[in-house]
């Protein structure tokens, strides 16, 4: 189990264009300079915005982190 706090809100629940969502989240990211950004919606505008957002992260030296359980924890959970 992993618990995260959200540092930035993308406001994806509001109807908006992909460009508007990108501007909203990158402005927040620029103001903070770092943070955890969690996209967990199924909105078309978020999906359409994602290539530009990933390009923005790459071009500005940010990193995407993929969270996966360690092999030891997976084995431990399987034995119970």
Image: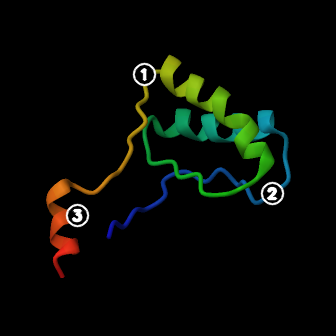
Q: Marks 1 and 2, how far apart in space?
A: 28 Å
User: Can you identify the residue that label 1 sits on?
Assistant: 61
Where does the image place residue 53, in percent across and percent down from the top left?
A: 62, 31
Question: Which element type, helix, strand or loop, lies under badge 1?
Answer: loop
* 40, above or below 33, in the image: below
Where does the image place residue 24, in percent across and percent down from the top left?
A: 70, 40
* 10, above or below 25, in the image: below
Where does the image place residue 50, in percent across and percent down from the top left?
A: 65, 36
Question: Which element type, helix, strand or loop, lies under badge 2?
Answer: loop
The residue at the point 54 percent across, 38 percent down is 29
Which quadrant is the N terminus positioned in?
A: bottom left
Q: Look at discs 1 and 3 and give the one toward the viewer.
A: 3
Dots 1, 2 in contact, CB < 8 A:
no
User: Can you identify the residue that label 3 sits on?
Assistant: 74
The label shown at residue 78 is: none
Q: Look at discs 2 and 3 and give the one toward the viewer.
A: 3
Where does the image place residue 16, in percent across and percent down from the top left?
A: 84, 46
The residue at the point 63 percent across, 41 percent down is 25
In the image, 34 versus 39, the foreground residue is: 39
Count residues near mark 3 (Cα–Cα under 10 Å), then give few for <14, some for 14-19, many for 20+: few
In the image, 52 versus 60, the foreground residue is: 52
Q: Marks 2 and 3, how far apart in space?
A: 38 Å
Q: Is residue 67 left or right of residue 12?
A: left
User: Can you identify the residue that label 2 sits on?
Assistant: 14
Give the mark nearer the N terminus: 2 vs 3: 2
Q: Is residue 53 left or right of residue 34?
A: right
Count residues near mark 1 (Cα–Cα under 10 Å), then give few for <14, some for 14-19, many for 20+: few
Dots 2, 3 in contact, CB < 8 A:
no
Give the mark nearer the N terminus: 1 vs 3: 1
């Amino acid at each position: 189990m992993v618990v995260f706090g959200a540092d930035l809100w993308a406001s994806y629940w509001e109807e908006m264009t992909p460009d508007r969502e990108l501007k909203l989240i990158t402005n927040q990211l620029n103001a903070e300079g770092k943070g955890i950004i969690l996209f967990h919606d199924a909105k078309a505008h978020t999906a359409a915005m994602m290539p530009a957002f990933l390009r923005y992260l790459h071009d500005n030296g940010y990193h995407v982190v993929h969270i996966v359980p360690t092999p030891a924890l997976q084995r431990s959970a399987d034995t119970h």
